[in-house]
């Protein structure tokens, strides 16, 4: 406990506020760790349980203790735990399941649905899907709330959330996962994970429960309506076991040079690693009976390099955690598995253009052979003729040709021959053919003559011919037909082909293409193309003209770049012993953050035993009478939870009136170099209190060098977030090695309290603005209100109504309206009828209990333009009396929730007719 009486306000109701800042890991102060895993599912959803009609179908039993089967895992009758969900706060039907041993798992998978009606019918359909994925761009603001209940305090759980991104494949999206801090901080962090589009993913969160219930909320911003949450698994993990495998359990398309890693179990001193191709051997092996799969015993590190893995193989592995002497207790691990990247990948039909010597009907063109028409989810082809190519009758030199979007190293071609129902009798299907390849479509190389197996003519027909393309580098493939299976009708057909390419170009970039908010120290990495001997890295700010910055032998490149900049990069894979010798990869992008975070106060918690409290890092004057500062509240939660940029800010009380000569809080930093990346400014935000007294001056110390706030002392009494930017060059501090940072208030007799948040390093000092007279060019009217309502710029003089007065203004005097019916009017003039204009005013409102108008125009009794002030926002409207464009600036909870009264605010409203936009500034 600490004395909270120093604060002039009491902690208000704690409602977490989310600020989207991309991160991949939960704060180290919490008990769990979050990982994000990409499921590289290409062309099919089968690997994640999605059927062809986009329905996520699983068997489960609602509200029952009877046996339940989910994803093929049976759960016997017994004690139940449950998952319940809420959509926008409305409870939905729960799902009961049983946990019978420590390795059981359960999942909830929901039918797809994007209409809001599906959210109200009480069944499982759409329960999770519309959390983010919605038929319009409107975000479901409250997101989805899930409660895991029936947990055992002290036990470790691994919870997995499956989701899929839809829409634009190149768009990076951010999901915010916000945990319930109401159960002693089981999961109280805000986690923001940015994912790339167009793929399936899951998030793993592993935590130790200290309560029976854990609530998690999923939120998103307005641009993320293409992300679709569709499933959950929850698994109890004994605390001594290895957890969080990398690659993730059952992952596919794993890099063949992958290094295995895991989260060590509690109390583990050494690790025994079992690894092999037999799940049975890996599960049964022990140190006494290794079965050839104990690949490392007694190792210290929680990583293992198995060497180059065999393409397309599924491997199984297990880690046993071994405790300290003398017991050397062994915690047997779970058997995990993953599948290595295949030898080759299918080329999508959208990347292939098919042409042919002739067609029988317009509906039976060659494009039917690459568009997937006629194929079902099991790759069985229909017997419908409109889903196949058929040549014209008596085509003397029949052929079909395939052109790719670029050169590929081709592995094989799967063939579905002509499969009309009459195929066994007539035999349109190709029998003998020559296959040729070309780089330019002009010069051809024959790969030989091949016989294509005949189709069955049944709807269950699958590909039954594989043409070995031998790794040929080609952009074109031509099939010249010599005969068909019937031998009588001179007409030739083909149902479908599927080409597979050996990956030669760089792929799977890290950071993901489109990633934003990155630190300026960037490590670029990628999955290398097969057989690449070296890698040329191109990096720059112009995507069309990228310079070569390095040639490296490893598939990574470390660099330092500027803040607030979008960069583009690509990799050219090189092997001089092959033809072609270079394979150019796609252009990727990333954007750096506009600033570098020094302190956002998000990592602190209320666990004093673990040194997690805010005042255990920011040292105050609690035990030093000469220092009048107190950091944090006297009772948990110690940090401010409502008035904050993220979920927390630092409460800072100061008292220089009772013997203290200063009030200061200081934290020690790991040595930081503030001369890098073109850094020029240090910024912070402070939030004042109207009850503060004395002429206190805010200051910051950098390595014991004091910089005093240059604004008015009255700024410390304003209950809004005030920015302060310090020009680092003016401080005289050795910025190469910054190890201390302090915030304080000086001034004898000063007493009060502030909130401090968002301390950042900036590439500029633009936060400190010197007002500049804009001049009179384009000025239509200017009202100083210095004792009258005349237009100082022209002749648009106003006429007062209701006898308003004049008083002290922000500059000179101001119009003072204290009663209803007080206003000034300006007669119509043609030069006031503008479509593009800006209006600005200094406004001081004493009461925001009702809407307060600032400026407006009327036509035939209808408002056509106005600016107004309300309790929680400043807004402007423009329209014709019936159709309106409304633009507003909201005062968020982090900014105090309401517009401060008795304070001058500068408001600007800008209308641009050419761009059809309206903006308002406060």
Image (cartoon, rainbow, N blue to C red):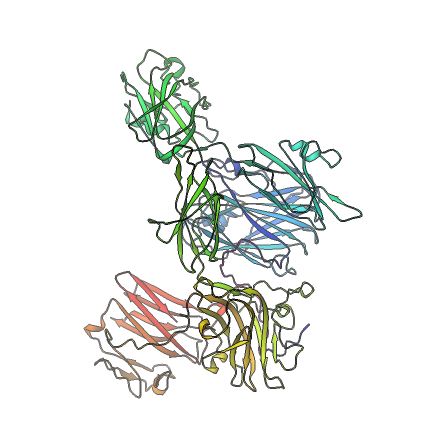
Position in image of residue 157 (x %, y %): 65, 49
Q: Magenta includes 636?
A: no
Extreme top residue here? 488
The answer to whether residue 563 is above or below residue 555 is below
- Magenta-highlighted residues: 8-25
Asked if one can make out residue 427 in the rendered structure from this viewpoint, the answer is: yes
The answer to whether residue 261 is above or below residue 910 is above
Asked if one can make out residue 413 in the rendered structure from this viewpoint, the answer is: no
Q: Please name the residue shown 68% across and 56% down the image.
A: 210
In terms of secondary structure, what is the magenta stretch mainly? loop
Position in image of residue 631 (x %, y %): 60, 73
Which of these two is toward me, 856 or 661?
A: 661
Position in image of residue 349 (x %, y %): 38, 33
Which of these two is toward me, 795 or 125?
A: 795
The answer to whether residue 585 is above or below residue 771 is above
Which of these two is toward me, 828 or 669?
A: 669
């Amino acid at each position: 406990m600490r004395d909270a009486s120093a604060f002039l306000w009491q902690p208000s109701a704690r409602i977490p506020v989310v600020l989207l800042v991309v991160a991949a890991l939960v704060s180290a102060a919490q008990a769990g760790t979050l990982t994000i895993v990409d499921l590289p599912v290409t062309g099919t959803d089968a690997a994640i349980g999605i059927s062809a009609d986009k329905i996520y179908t699983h068997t489960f039993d609602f509200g029952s203790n009877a046996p339940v089967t989910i994803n093929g895992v049976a759960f016997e009758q017994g004690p139940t735990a449950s998952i319940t969900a809420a959509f926008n706060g409305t409870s939905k039907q729960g799902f009961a399941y049983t946990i019978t041993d420590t390795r059981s798992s359960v999942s909830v998978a929901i039918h797809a649905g994007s209409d809001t009606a599906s959210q109200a019918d009480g069944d499982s359909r759409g329960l999770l899907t519309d959390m983010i994925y919605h038929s319009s761009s409107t975000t479901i603001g409250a997101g989805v709330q899930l409660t895991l209940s029936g947990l055992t305090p002290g036990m470790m759980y691994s919870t997995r959330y499956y989701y899929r991104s839809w829409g634009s494949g190149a768009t990076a999206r951010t999901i915010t996962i916000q945990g319930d801090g109401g159960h002693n901080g089981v999961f109280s962090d805000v986690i923001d994970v940015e994912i790339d589009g167009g793929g399936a993913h899951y998030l793993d969160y592993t935590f130790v429960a200290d309560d029976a219930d854990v609530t998690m909320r999923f939120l998103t911003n307005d641009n993320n309506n293409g992300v679709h949450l569709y499933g959950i698994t929850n698994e109890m993990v004994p605390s001594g076991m290895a957890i969080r495998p990398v690659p993730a359990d059952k992952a596919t398309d794993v890099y063949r040079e992958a290094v295995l890693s895991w989260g060590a179990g509690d109390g583990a001193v050494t690790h025994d690693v079992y690894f092999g191709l037999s799940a049975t051997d890996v599960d049964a092996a022990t140190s006494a009976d290794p079965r050839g799969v104990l690949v490392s015993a007694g190792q210290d590190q929680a990583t293992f390099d198995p060497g180059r893995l065999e393409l397309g193989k599924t491997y199984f592995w297990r880690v046993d955690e071994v405790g300290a002497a003398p017991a050397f207790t062994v915690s047997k691990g779970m058997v995990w598995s993953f599948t290595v990247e295949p030898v080759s990948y299918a080329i999508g039909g959208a990347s292939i253009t098919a042409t042919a010597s002739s067609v029988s009907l317009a509906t039976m063109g060659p494009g039917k052979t690459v568009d997937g028409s006629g194929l079902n989810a099991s790759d069985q082809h229909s017997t419908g003729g409109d889903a196949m190519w058929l040549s014209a009758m008596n085509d003397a030199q029949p052929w079909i040709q395939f052109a790719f979007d670029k050169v590929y190293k081709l592995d094989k071609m799967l063939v579905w021959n002509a499969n009309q129902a009459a195929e066994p009798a007539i035999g349109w299907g190709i029998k003998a053919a020559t296959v040729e390849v070309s780089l330019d479509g002009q010069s051809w190389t024959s790969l030989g003559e091949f016989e294509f197996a005949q189709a069955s003519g049944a709807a269950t027909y699958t590909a039954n011919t594989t043409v070995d393309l031998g790794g040929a580098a080609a952009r074109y493939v031509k099939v010249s037909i010599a005969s068909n299976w019937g031998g009588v009708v001179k007409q030739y057909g083909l149902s479908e082909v599927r080409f597979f390419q050996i990956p030669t170009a760089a792929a799977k970039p890290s950071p993901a293409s489109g990633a934003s908010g990155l630190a300026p120290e960037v490590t670029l990495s990628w999955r290398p193309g097969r057989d690449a001997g070296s890698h040329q890295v191109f990096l720059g700010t112009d995507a069309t003209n990228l310079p070569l910055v390095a040639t490296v032998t490893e598939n990574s490149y470390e660099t330092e770049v500027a803040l607030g900049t979008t960069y583009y990069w690509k990799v050219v894979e090189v092997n001089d012993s092959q033809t072609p010798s270079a394979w150019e990869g796609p252009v990727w992008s990333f954007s750096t953050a506009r600033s570098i975070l020094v302190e956002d106060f998000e990592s602190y918690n209320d666990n004093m035993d673990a040194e997690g409290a805010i005042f255990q890092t920011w040292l105050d004057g609690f035990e030093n009478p000469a220092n009048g500062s107190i950091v944090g509240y006297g009772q948990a939660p110690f940090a401010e939870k409502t008035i904050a940029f993220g979920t927390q800010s630092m409460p800072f009380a100061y008292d220089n009136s009772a013997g203290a000569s200063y009030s200061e809080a200081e934290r020690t930093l790991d040595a930081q170099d503030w001369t890098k990346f073109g850094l020029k400014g240090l910024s912070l935000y402070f939030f004042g209190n109207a009850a503060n007294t004395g002429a206190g001056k805010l200051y910051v110390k950098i390595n014991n060098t004091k910089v005093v706030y240059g604004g008015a002392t009255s700024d410390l009494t304003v209950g809004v977030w005030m920015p302060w930017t310090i020009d680092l060059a003016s401080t005289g501090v050795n910025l190469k090695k910054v190890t201390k940072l302090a915030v304080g208030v000086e001034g004898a007799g000063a007493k009060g309290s502030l909130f401090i948040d968002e301390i950042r390093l900036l590439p500029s000092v633009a936060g400190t603005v010197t007002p500049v007279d804009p001049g009179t060019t384009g000025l239509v009217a200017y009202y100083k209100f210095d004792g009258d309502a005349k237009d100082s710029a022209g002749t648009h003089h106003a006429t007062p109504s209701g006898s308003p007065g004049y008083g002290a203004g922000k500059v000179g005097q101001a119009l003072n309206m204290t009663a209803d019916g007080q206003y000034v009017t300006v007669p119509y003039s043609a030069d006031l009828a503008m479509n593009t204009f800006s209006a600005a005013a200094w406004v001081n409102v004493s009461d925001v209990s009702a809407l307060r108008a600032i400026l407006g125009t009327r036509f035939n009794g209808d408002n056509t333009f106005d600016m107004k002030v309300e309790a929680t926002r400043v807004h402007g409207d423009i329209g014709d009396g019936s159709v309106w464009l409304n633009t507003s600036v909201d005062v968020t909870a982090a900014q105090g929730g309401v517009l401060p009264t008795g304070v001058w605010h500068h408001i600007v409203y800008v209308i641009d007719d050419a761009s059809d936009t309206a903006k308002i500034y406060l």
